[in-house]
Image (cartoon, rainbow, N blue to C red):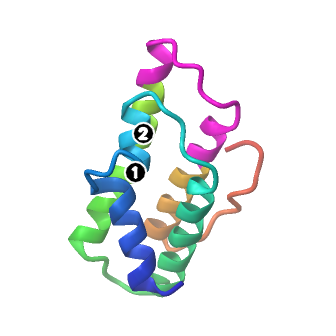
Amino acid sequence: MNYATARQLIETQVTAADAEALLARLAQGRPPVPGQVTSILLALKVMYEALHNQADLDRRAAALLYRLAWESRSSFEQGVRQGVDWPPLLETDLGRIAAAVQGIFSDTWPDIHQSSL
């Protein structure tokens, strides 16, 4: 996977009108499809590697990353308040996504496999 493909995958998961996009599924109280979080984490790692040591990050990429981290967590918490029975590892997976996004912003890749995320 290259940067353009990774960025397109993230954009699709954030902005697509596709009901299967991560943010759309979470907003509807549905969990990610199998492999969806893994694909997102791989795309975030590719983006990190491509942007590592660069001084600037374009606005569109920053907005996509922010929305991915913020809205996924927000939809998850909304679902919790509404009694959605989320998969047991979803909260940890969303923590990994947020940590990966933070890693891109801070230019330091985190250990996203820590159980404390």
Quadrant for residue 55, please give it.
bottom left
Residue at the image point whose x is 65% and y is 41% from the top: 92
The residue tagged with tag 1: helix, strand or loop?
loop
Amino acid at circle 2 = Arg
Distance from disc 2 to disc 1, alpha carbons, whole Å, reads 6 Å
Which label number is shown at residue 25?
A: 2
Residue 59 location, x and y as percent? 22, 70
Q: Which quadrant: the N terminus? A: bottom right
Q: Amino acid at mark 1?
A: Ala
Is residue 22 rendered to the left or right of residue 114? left
Judging depth in this view, the residue of 12 and 104 nearest the camera is 12
Residue 110 bears which disc, if any?
Answer: none
Span shown in magenta: 78-95
Q: Do the CB atoms of the residues marked 2 and 1 lie less than 8 Å apart?
A: yes
Residue in the image at 59% along x and 20% along y: 85
Q: Is 83 located above or below residue 33 in the figure?
A: above
Res 71 visible:
no
For label 2, count other residues whose C-alpha is less than 10 Å away and answer few (under 14), some (14-19) or many (20+). some
Question: Seen in the image, is 4 located left or right of residue 49?
Answer: left
The residue located at (43%, 36%) in the rendering is: 26
Instruction: Say which quarter of the image contains residue 74.
Output: top left
User: In the rendering, which numbered label is found on residue 21?
Assistant: 1
Q: Nearer the viewer, residue 35 or 110?
A: 35
76 in the magenta segment:
no
Coordinates of residue 47 in the picture (x, y in percent): 47, 77
